Amino acid sequence: MTFTGKVAVVTGAASGIGRATALALGRRGARVALFDLNPEGMAETAAQLQQAGAQSQSYGLDITNQEQVNQTVAQVVERWGSLHIMVNAAGINQAGPTSYGPGIEVSEADWDRMMDVNLMGTVHCALAAAQYMRPLRRGRIVNVASVAGAVPRMNMASYCVAKAAVRMFTKCLALELAAFSITVNAVAPGPTQTPMLGSAAGDADPQALERMIAGNPDIYRLGVPLGKLGQPEDVASAIQYLASDEAHHVTGVILNVDGMAQLT
Ligand SMILES: NC(=O)c1ccc[n+]([C@@H]2O[C@H](COP(=O)([O-])OP(=O)(O)OC[C@H]3O[C@@H](n4cnc5c(N)ncnc54)[C@H](O)[C@@H]3O)[C@@H](O)[C@H]2O)c1
């Protein structure tokens, strides 16, 4: 599998799954545009890409701002003359003080923020890419959903709903863009060892990750049947396949990368 000659945008590239994906694509020859709010994190990703001999360019932006997204995607196309792959990995699992807790108590502001980043941020980036790809009749869009968008999780209602929406958006867009040979797929990670997971598990509690694997009746019930957390590279491998030329006949798929946590 090679990405030589390909231009890829990866959102959330400053950390976790986005960083691992940027590195995976860059190491296989793609030029990678890094999109994120966090300049320090992007600088670290860019340094790792440079070490690997890959080309990248960092763009600081907030994916909730549609105009900024459109302008930034246009800048990428202007710089490198093309856009073949859009990976939407930016996301949040905490949108404010009430977003982790009983759904009945989540504030409107926290609902809005969760939906803005996880759903509308993904929508803005996917559409900006699709606008460019459609006349060329080719392209790969890969969204990062979650098993939490298919299986309800205690105290995570707004996150689960936003990720469920990302899953359906992926399928609808796949259907609409199929006539243009553009594929749209999503990966659905289970618990994956990134900074985001630490905050979900409770950073202060060293046994929290163990409980997440073993199962916690209040939150994750049966845990992860494969008995381990995912690594960002595990998710990046699946994204890499969906972004590849080889996956040209695969669209509208939600690929679980979760050690079978979707059953729990
Ligand atoms: N880690 C897990 O267990 C897990 C499980 C399922 C799904 N996911 C999903 O995977 C994706 C990546 O998560 P991660 O675990 O790597 O988290 P992470 O916190 O390590 O990385 C998320 C990145 O998104 C960026 N970001 C957040 N809001 C943004 C915005 N408005 N504009 C631009 N950038 C923004 C952050 O700065 C950060 O660099 C997310 O969509 C997350 O919901 C993660």
Image (cartoon, rainbow, N blue to C red):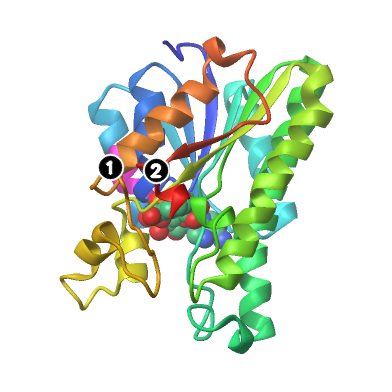
What residue is drawn where x is 53% and y is 85%? 98
Q: How far apart are marks 2 and 1 (CA)?
A: 7 Å
Residue 226 circle label: 1
Task: Give coordinates of residue 112: x percent, y percent.
Answer: 68, 73
Classified by dominant secondary structure, the portion drawn in magenta counts as helix
Q: Which of the 4 image quarters holds residue 131?
A: top right
Left or right of residue 79, residue 238 in this image: left
Q: Is residue 214 left or right of residue 255?
A: left
Q: Is residue 259 left or right of residue 67?
A: left
Element under label 2?
Answer: loop
Which residue occupies the extreme bottom position in the image? 105
**Residue 29 image label:** none
Residue 44 within the segment the image draws in magenta: yes
**Residue 152 location in percent, x, y?**
55, 63
The furthest residue to the left: 206
Name which residue lies at 34% across and 53% down: 41
Q: Are marks 2 and 1 in contact (CB under 8 Å)?
A: yes
Residue 84, compared with residue 13, is above or below; it is above
Magenta stretch in the rendered image: 42-47
Q: In this view, does 123 lie above or below 184?
A: below
Residue that appears at 39% across and 44% down: 17
27 vs 82, nearest the viewer: 27
Label 2 or label 1, whichever comes before in sequence order: 1
Q: Which mark is residue 260?
A: 2
